[in-house]
Amino acid sequence: MKGYYYRKASHKVHKKKHRMKFTRKCWQINKLSASTFSKCIHDCKSQGSIPVLISVPNYNGWNYQKHNALQEIADKNEINFVDLNLELKKQINWKKDSVDGGDHLNIKGAKKTSAYLGEYLKKEYGLPDRRGTTNYKQWDNDVEEWEKLIFDKNGFIKNYFALFNSMRAIYPNYQIAYSYKTNYTPYICKLVKDIL
């Protein structure tokens, strides 16, 4: 997840509000921001790219008036607008998926958002899966590093030794083995080898 600052904590939204209640009112975007949007869209198109406006889930800072403003920009420029505040309305749990009470997503919310967006881009634009291809090797490396980051190494070691010591107390001549079917397997094997 390039550009994502990993945060595992959860802080639920305390203030309930009807932020995404339908309205025809439109938030007024300042002239500089509107001009910057138009320039970015024009630059993307002139380079042969297909721009897509996306709003990521944000409980505190987003509302239907802002949705309408970006929808107007998208319509005016003949591009798609994906408002993940609407698309993921039922998937995002604001009690568990926010790191700071509704402004930013934690890892759980980011995974839901990334999964949805990946499927959307694949379906709407035919974005191919580039995993395992030479020109995209760095992305594969980044995924490997990302998986190490989200893996709870200390929790694993604590769990391993709790199980190890419990087993040894009853069966002193046996060794325990973990069985995994995940992308973590090479990392876990090295970790177990290092701690023994």
Image: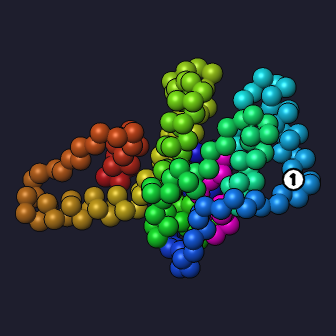
The dominant secondary structure in magenta is: loop
- In front of the other: 123 or 196: 123
Residue that mark 1 sits on: 33
Q: Is residue 19 visible?
A: yes
Seen at 82% across and 60% down, the residue is 28
Q: Quadrant for residue 160, please give it.
A: bottom left
Residue at the extreme front: 24
Q: Residue 125, relative to residue 103: is it above or below?
A: above
Q: Is residue 31 magenta?
A: no
Q: Position of residue 185 (x, y in %)?
A: 35, 40
- What percent of the width, then of the height, locates residue 140? 54, 32
Range of magenta residues: 54-64
Q: Is residue 166 left or right of residue 72?
A: left
Type of residue at label 1? Ser
Count of residue discs:
1
Snapshot quadrant of residue 53: top right
For this orientation, the residue located farthest to the bottom is 15
Q: Is residue 72 left or right of residue 120?
A: right
Query: Would residue 31 be found to the left or right of residue 47 on screen?
Result: right
* Image quarter in which the N terminus is found: top right
Q: Position of residue 119 (x, y in %)?
A: 50, 36
Q: Residue at x 79, y 39 (%)?
A: 76
Q: Is residue 145 visible?
A: no
Q: Is residue 120 above or below residue 107?
A: above
Residue depicted at x 83% and y 57%: 29
Residue 164, x across and y down, in percent: 21, 59
